[in-house]
Image (cartoon, helix red, strand yellow):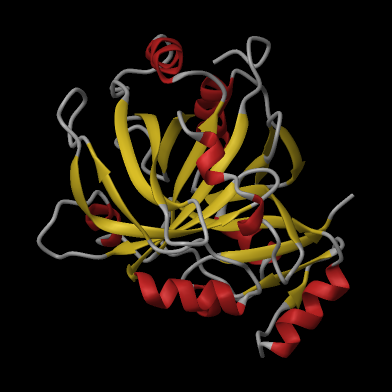
Amino acid sequence: MNNDQFKLELDHVGLILRDLEVGRAIYEGLGFKLTPRSLHSGSREPGQPVVEFGSGNHCVMLEKGYFEVMGLTDPDLYSTARTMLKKYEGLHIIAFEGADAKNSYRMLSQRFDGVQEPRRLERVVDIGSCKEESRAVFNNVTLDPNLFPEAKIIFIEHVTRELLWQQKWMEHPNGALSLEEVALCVEDVDSVSEKYSRLFNSKPAFPMKGVAQFKLSEGKVYIVNPAALAKWVPGVSPPAVPSVFGVGFSVRDLEETKRVLDTNSVNYQSHPYPGIWIHPDITGGAVVSFMQSE
């Protein structure tokens, strides 16, 4: 992809749990306002008809980006979530937006083998106060999981963006404003960074030993080895190596965010920079960070 051709943005990060209701309760307790439960539908293969899936989500919609809390809803229906849940409960999905799906597919296919053709996905969303509903539509391009085992990497095209970013879902008690960063844990930061350099068509910075940082048009991607992770969030082990282990949000007023967490009896710890983080034992498997917005 060429960042000179379009703005490549961190669109959303997805957490997958076996019990969707557990996920909803956790993230409301962290001070987020979640969208109502939405059930997934999609094409199992590119070009196939859209069918019901056995999964659903609640979303944290933000001024920039969003966070998806996903879980199984029907044991008898197909869901890609089952494969990921065999590895661990926690963060799995990293989605980027920058071009329409056809152009993303064309450009990614020039850089990697095993890129899947665009696949249509849908889910029902609430659009009114009287239980009025409509369908949000996405065209997704995914990369070969054998080449990107650390995460499910998606390049997403929002066909119905206006259905998702509704103002009524974007005011959060904890003051969250935007999806700022996602962090992956890998053994070899150098080799994985080279792969993501090809993905983003950009070079990373190395702010400290064992850490690579990619700055996108919106959002950052960190690639961290286990030793650096242990220094960043002491006492935390990644759910697997490789894996996605952390997600970060900017907030309007960090002190107000702390007050909300205190009221909800959520324990947190301080980062060395102006921010706090919450242990994955509390959050369903993710290191969740809140940072003061600039």
- Please tell me which residue is depicted at 73% across the width and 38% down the height of the picture: 206
Quadrant that contains the N terminus: top right
Q: Quadrant of residue 89?
A: bottom left
- Does 176 sit left or right of 199 as displayed? right
Report whether residue 280 is seen: no
Give x and y (percent) for residue 217.
71, 28
- Please tell me which residue is depicted at 68% across the width and 40% down the height of the picture: 220
Give the number of marks.
0
Give x and y (percent) for residue 247.
60, 56
Give x and y (percent) for residue 269.
74, 77
Q: Nearer the viewer, residue 28 or 258?
A: 28
Report whether residue 21 is seen: yes
Q: Is residue 65 above or below residue 113?
A: below
Q: Is residue 285 above or below residue 52?
A: below
Q: Nearer the viewer, residue 12 or 235?
A: 12
Give x and y (percent) for residue 160.
47, 33
- Please tell me which residue is depicted at 25% across the width and 65% down the height of the picture: 73
